[in-house]
Each structure stands twice: as structure tokens, then as C-alpha cells.
Image (cartoon, coloured by chain):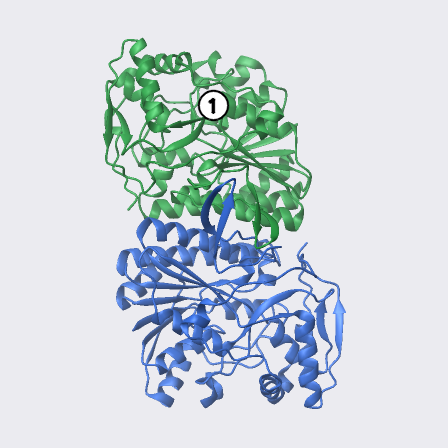
Chain colours: A blue, B green
Amino acid sequence: MRILILGGDGYLGWPTAMNLAAHGHEIIVADNYLRRSLCRETSSEPLFEVPNLQDRAVHWFERTGQKISVAIGNLADWTFAAGVFEQFLPEAVIHYAEQPSGPYSMMNRGAAATTLNNNLGTTFNVIFAVKEFCPDCHIIKLGTMGEYGTPNIDIEEGWLDIKHKGREGRFLFPRQAGSLYHTTKIMDTDLLWFYVRNWGLRVTDLMQGPVYGMETEESGVDQRLMPFFNYDEIFGTVLNRFVVQAVAGFPLTVYGAGGQTRGFLNIKDTLSCVKLAALTPPDKGQLRIFNQFTEVFSVNDLASHVQRAGRLLGYDVMIKSIANPRQELEEHYYNPAHTGLLELGLEPHLLTDNVLAGMLETVARNADRIDQRKFLRGVKWA
Amino acid sequence: MRILILGGDGYLGWPTAMNLAAHGHEIIVADNYLRRSLCRETSSEPLFEVPNLQDRAVHWFERTGQKISVAIGNLADWTFAAGVFEQFLPEAVIHYAEQPSGPYSMMNRGAAATTLNNNLGTTFNVIFAVKEFCPDCHIIKLGTMGEYGTPNIDIEEGWLDIKHKGREGRFLFPRQAGSLYHTTKIMDTDLLWFYVRNWGLRVTDLMQGPVYGMETEESGVDQRLMPFFNYDEIFGTVLNRFVVQAVAGFPLTVYGAGGQTRGFLNIKDTLSCVKLAALTPPDKGQLRIFNQFTEVFSVNDLASHVQRAGRLLGYDVMIKSIANPRQELEEHYYNPAHTGLLELGLEPHLLTDNVLAGMLETVARNADRIDQRKFLRGVKWA
């Protein structure tokens, strides 16, 4: 299948590109290195350097003989986006090309504007490029579980059947998110859902939880093929940050009461989910939504888990509650459905001591690169 | 009260400015003439010319001795928007500064991008300017009944209490709109609702139906103080267009079966609703939502009504169904609540034969300016 990966330089984009190339698909990745620029601007560089996208494609080709094409440019710019779609005519497009950090989006007005303009501008161009150049193309959009927030009712997979005053309707599950970044993803959904209905686009929206891990089947062969691994408070996801804090002998920094509960998944499962979605396109005019995570944990659960796994390896892991910089509930109901991807065949990689030991060991090999000043960055929500 | 009116040159913005000035408020209007430019670009000029905003403020001052300040610039540009807020420090801001046409937003990619960027860029700047310069300021945002679409359940005023699997929650009423323009208003709501929760802004969202009419208490004194009156298929609302078609001897153009049903209101009631909202600000951290219309009609109802009123004045009014250029249900359930503004004291001006006669007579005085080529413009949704 001809698959275009937008944001192909990112934490998930590059591993996805290798994985789909390894499974015989024809891959082109597009990126403008926005994430790298923002990491540098905010002094939030990843744990180890990764080569640029062109070089990674060369390394991959040398290792496997498989070609990954590369296009560098800004997908929020129509001329660039249109050129990529027109030349490649993808059968599926995987849309990771968004500023992905909640904390970054809350830093100041400029960061908020960058997030809004990039995320909506790119999604808008994807919609119009598919309509113009490849109307049958399957758009696979990375959404986030954060769009739902933490409602007091069970979270269904994207849709909710509502009975009201004796009548019934089916609606997008009502959404209210906890950061501007997550809110732009709600707005993406509004935009996609309108054009799905109006033009008969075919879209899969993957409502993903926080991802952890870095090694995938393909990255193991060559350190230069590893994805970014951010461990800072701005771009690092919570479990990745905890693992680095454990190795550094820095207390695991739990926000407030630590009862914040979310659905998580291993990076290997992200690749499986995206692949399963790509192989089973929805009908035209359908917006198919999956909740993409494998296990639910509170922040306290994660901290305890890392503490236990760390102690097994001889690390003296402490846990410390700090004032919560975010506006969020620290204790809440949380019961999200997630059966759709399992029904498609997902076989989850769960969070075992063994998985954590593997992460701790990889981080330990790069322990001299850990910069403890990156753990806490003082981004406040209000 | 110091009131800033964004989009103060528009069909509703200028009459609102005069009305609030006449009631003793200190008024500044801001506009970049986007609507005028788009009307010219699309050859959709209004029925009669209106002076520019500076000149209208002069005419108003000469008539009444009341000053309306004018700032010309692009509110989607932060430097201009910030300057206006910082200088004036409004106690209330009335946000009309959006590209308001569904058909325009569906014309092509450029028009869609203009709509998205202007509407979200302006709303974003309003949020950040209020936060930075006047955090207690009451934001009165014009939403649209079109955000709700035509669901199969009763439409409540902004919010819905949902029971699901034995638990309960209160959510924004789920929205799905019928054009990109209406979808940008949903996205505005997402954005405002996030920052209301995060920063404690105070916001009133007025979910307005299509407005008709042109004369208000203040415009009657001087023809040069009348608002724009668009009667074309792109910028003209349906009832205004029907009235002009009746005067021109052109059949009233009903789309498809004509069962499309919406809530409508007289322009005089728009002014009352906005004023009632301004005089009763919500608490900080509250997003208050009202459904702003006074009567529900189908397109067929409106056509029959205009036909009857026209015949009373001697016009031979015909009705003709044409192929529907839109993607919309032509027969549907529609039962929206609208009690909030009535409880605040709104006294509706209903659509009587007399009101229609007044509109027909005003249009008849400008009959030589009617350009029948503007009635049908061929903008198609798909």
C-alpha cells in the first residue's frame, strides 16, 4: 500500500515508517522538524541525539534494502502539502503532524498560537489535499484520549447514543479537554467530521493515550534508528519521565494527589494499532473512532510500578508529590471503552516489570546524558 | 459601560453600536472591512451602499451628539487586537468579527481557509487580550443555532444532562454543523470553553438563528445609518432574499422540499438580546449559553408568508423549488429551547404581515438597485 506519514520524524512517526516499510508498504515521510525546533527553543532536547530524517532513511536502507522516501517541508503550507499528495497519491495517510505537547501549548500566547495554527492548518490541508488529489485515500488521524477529559460517565469509543425526552440520537461523544493542545485535537475532529459528512471522506480517528517505551522491532537493529526519547516535563510523557528520574536518582515527581487516571500503551502497540487501522479502511463517508490504549493506570500506580521495577535493578527510587501545575481533577471516575482495536486483532504489550527493566537499562546506557534541570520546567496552567 | 464591538461595520455590528450608544454606553467599534471585501470579491454587494465606518460615526454624532470611536484593523492580528484592548480596557466585548456566510465558506479552499483563519484567529486573540488586559471583561460571543445542526432530539440551551449506564454528567450539547462556517463556530466554542475553565473568563455565547430586517430604532433617523442589506445567495439570509425576490418579481427560490426548519429573529431582537446579555454578565468561570431566536419556521413557511404579504401589496409572488445546492435534511425534527433570553426580559418582534410590508416597502424604494444575477450563485456543497 502507498502510505504517506505526516510528522514522520517524530517519536511515533519514524518507528511507524520503519514498521510499515518492513511489512512491505511503500512509504513516504513528511516533516518540517517542528518538534526538534520546539525542543531546542525550550531547552528540552531528547535523551540522545537522533540523525536527521534523510540520514535515518539512508541508515534504514543500508540495513534493510527498503526505501523510505523523505519530503521536508511545512504541511500547514498548502503548496508543500499539495505537492506531496499530488506526487505520491497515497492510499493511506497517517497524520501525526501536530504539536503534541499539552505543557508546551500552555507556556504562553506564542506557543498556543503555534499549536493552534500548526495543528489546524495541517489537518485542514490534509482534508483539502485528499479531496483534490486522492479522494479514496484513507485518513488515519491521531487523536487523543485527552479529548474526552475525565467525565463522570463511561467513555465510549468516539460516539454516544443519547436518549433525551423520549427521543434518540447518536452523537460524537461530548468532549472537553485539559489543555489547549488537547483542545486543538477536538477541533480537528470537528473539522474532519464535517468534511466526512459533506464529501464522503474515509477517516479513522485513533484516540490515543500516553505512549511509553522506545524500542520497537525495527529500532533494535541500530541505535541510530531509535526514536526521540524526551524525558522533560514539556515533551516527555509521564512514564518515560519517571524511568529517567529513577535512573538519575531523582524522586519521581507526582502532581498533587496522583489519582489522575489515564489509558496508556507501549509504543509497539501504537505501531500495531496504526497498521491494523490501515489494513481495514472504513467505508467512504465513515468516521471510525477507536480508543487506543491497553491499560488504565493512575499516576500513583505508575510511580509505584517504576519504583518496584527500579528497586529490582538496585535503584533507590523515591516518590515525591509536588504542587500540580495543571488544572485537572486529581481524583475522578474513569472508565473508557477500548474494544475496537482488540477486535481488529491487537495483541497488547502490557506494562510488566520486564518491560520497565528494559526501559531502565536503555536509559542507564545513556545516563551521562541526563540533564536533571529538564525534569521540572515550571509551566503553569493558570 | 465601556463596550467594544468587534465586527462593528457589519449587518449587526453597526446597529448594535448605535443602539448601545443611544442607551448611554461608551462604544468603540473595530473592523477591517473583511465583509465588504468579500462581498466585492464575490460580486455580492448589498442592496444599497453604506458609508464607511468613520463616516457613519460622524453621521451618528451629527444626529445625536453621541460619540462612537472607530478602530480599523485586523483583529486576527495580535498587534492590532492587543492595542485596541489595551487602550480601551472594555468591560464587555461583543464579538461579531467573523466571516458569517455558510455558502462563502463552501466556495473553494481559499474561502474556507479565510473563514477558518479569520474566525479562529480573532477568537483566539480576544481570549488572550481579555486575559492580558481586562480579565474581568465579559465576552459576548455570537454563536449560531447552526452549530447544533438538526438532531433527532430536542435542542437545549447549550448544555445537556446525560444519563449513561447509571451515571450522570453535564456536557456542552453535542454539535454538528452544516457548513464550514458553522463548524468554525463550534471550534470557537471549544476554544472559549477551555479557557473559561482554565482561566475563569466570563463568557456569554449567543446561539443565534438567521436574522431578518434592516430597520432599527436608531437607523430610522437617517438612511446613511442603515446596515448592509445583502440579498444574494452568498451573504443574504433567506428571508431578506425572499423579500427582494418578491419585489423584483423573481420566484422565491426554495431549496428542495423546503422543509428545512430553523429559528429566526428580527434584527431589533438581536439588539435587545445583546443588550440584555451585556447588562447581566455571568460569573467568572461561567460559559452562559442562550439560544437566540424568537420563532421557528420552515423555508416553505417563510416563502408562503412573503407570498401572502407581497400579494397584499400587489406583488405577484411566485414560489419555485430548485435543486438544493447544500447537503442538508429537507425534512427533519426540530425543537429547540429558547427561554433564557425571554426570562431576561426579551420582548420579541414577531414576523407579522406588517413587518414584512415594512421590509417590502424599504426594498421597493431601492428596487432599481436590485441585480437579479445575485439571487442564484451556484455555490455547491459537494
The residue sitting at 50% across, 46% down in the picture is A163
Q: Nearer the viewer, residue A102 or B307?
A: B307
Image coordinates of residue B324 in percent, x first then y, are: 27, 37
Image coordinates of residue A105 in percent, x first then y, are: 57, 59
The 10 Å Cα crowd at callout 1, few under 14, some 14 to 19, many 20 or more, is many
**Above or below: residue B274 compared with residue B288:** above
The residue sitting at 67% across, 80% down in the picture is A306
Image coordinates of residue B360 in percent, x first then y, are: 35, 15
Q: Nearer the viewer, residue A198 or B220?
A: A198
Q: Which residue is mark 1?
A: B267
Residue B26 showing in the rendered view: no
Q: Amino acid at mark 1?
A: Ile
Image coordinates of residue A51 in percent, x first then y, are: 46, 81
Q: Count the marks: how many?
A: 1
Position of B309 compared to B132: left or right? left
Q: Nearer the viewer, residue A166 or A20?
A: A166
Give the position of the N terminus of chain A as an image quadrant: bottom left
Q: Secondary structure at mark 1?
A: helix
Residue A70 showing in the rendered view: yes
Give the position of the C terminus of chain A as an image quadrant: bottom right
Q: Which chain's residue wears label 1? A: B
**Above or below: residue A372 compared with residue A120:** below
**Above or below: residue B235 compared with residue A30:** above
**Above or below: residue B129 compared with residue A133:** above
